[in-house]
């Protein structure tokens, strides 16, 4: 009987560890969809889950790149939240097909609302023109809780491919669709570009399966461990020949 209790204890501990390893991959601030075409205009949503059981998220501050600034940025109102868009002078002018860009949006802040424990909120932004000479853009984000805690989601991807503890929202940029009539996969309809800008290109499909795959992998590990424990118990109970 003591063996059964020990096996149950090991199983419970392994289940808790697996859940702890799987959940962080789903909890950080992300950008959805996670992929767009180089040189295009796109609409994205910053998805913010509340990670705390005893506090609500009350402020989100997203920093926009200054080394590859975006000439056109607009935000979609979120009921209950106030938004402030900060436009700043760039360290040096950036040449674009519309001329030299000397100022650009460098920060967007949402506050006044509340994301309760167990909930998430999405903050939508239309932006472009996306650069053509890089394969990704980082959007460092600060998440403020009602208790005063500030979580800084600003770490770049690690060189070895593993995920950072507090990764910044990452938008991957893929080459534009070929001119021979082929098109890139899309999950969102094209939107209208700002006045004077070219028509928007389709947004490439998001890569949003990573977190789900990790969670399913963790569940598979637990099921495998349960099978091993059941097998061992069966062998222990088998009568001697």
Image (cartoon, rainbow, N blue to C red):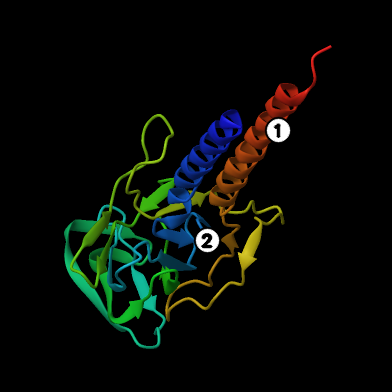
> In the rendered view, does 148 fall on the left or right side of 16?
left
Estimate the spatial distance between the alpha carbons at disc 1 and disc 2, rounded to whole Å: 42 Å
Q: Which mark is residue 58?
A: none
Looking at the image, do the residues carrying marks 1 and 2 touch, with CB atoms under 8 Å apart? no
Q: Is residue 138 above or below residue 223?
A: below
The image quadrant of residue 229 is: top right
Taking the spot 66% from the left edge, 57% from the top edge, the residue there is 185
Which numbered mark, 1 or 2, is in the foreground of this view?
1
User: Does the rendering let one see residue 105?
Assistant: no
Q: According to the image, label 2 marks what residue?
A: 33
Indicate the position of residue 141 as horizontal and vertical percent values. Answer: 29, 60
Helix, strand or loop for disc 2? loop
Indicate the position of residue 4 as horizontal and vertical percent values. Answer: 61, 33
User: Does the rendering let one see residue 130?
Assistant: yes
Q: Which mark is residue 230?
A: 1
Binning the other alpha carbons within 10 Å of mark 1 as few (below 14), some (14 to 19) or many (20 upward) gives few
**Farthest residue toward the top?**
241
Q: Nearer the viewer, residue 1 or 12?
A: 1
Q: Is residue 23 above or below residue 237?
A: below
Q: Earlier in the sequence, mark 1 or mark 2?
A: 2
């Amino acid at each position: 009987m003591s063996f059964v209790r020990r096996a149950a204890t090991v199983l419970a501990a392994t289940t808790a560890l697996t859940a702890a390893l799987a959940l962080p991959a789903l909890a950080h601030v992300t950008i959805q969809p996670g992929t767009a075409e180089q040189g295009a205009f796109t609409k994205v949503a910053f998805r913010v889950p509340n990670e705390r059981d005893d506090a609500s998220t009350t402020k989100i501050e997203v920093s926009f790149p200054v080394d590859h600034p975006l000439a056109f940025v607009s935000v979609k109102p979120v009921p209950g939240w106030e938004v402030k868009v900060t436009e700043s002078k760039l360290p040096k002018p950036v040449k674009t097909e519309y001329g030299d860009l000397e100022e650009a949006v460098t920060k967007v802040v949402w506050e006044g609302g509340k994301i309760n424990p167990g909930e998430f909120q999405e903050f939508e932004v239309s932006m472009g023109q996306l650069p053509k000479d890089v394969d990704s853009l980082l959007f460092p984000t600060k998440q403020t809780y009602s208790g005063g805690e500030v979580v800084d989601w600003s770490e770049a991807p690690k060189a070895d491919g593993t995920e950072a503890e507090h990764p910044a929202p990452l938008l991957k940029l893929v080459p534009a669709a070929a001119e021979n009539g082929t098109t890139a996969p899309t999950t969102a309809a094209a939107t209208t570009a700002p006045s004077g800008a070219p028509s928007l290109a389709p947004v490439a499909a998001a890569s949003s399966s990573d977190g789900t795959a990790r969670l399913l992998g963790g569940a598979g590990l637990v099921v495998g461990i349960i099978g091993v424990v059941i097998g061992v118990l069966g062998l222990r109970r088998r009568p001697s020949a």
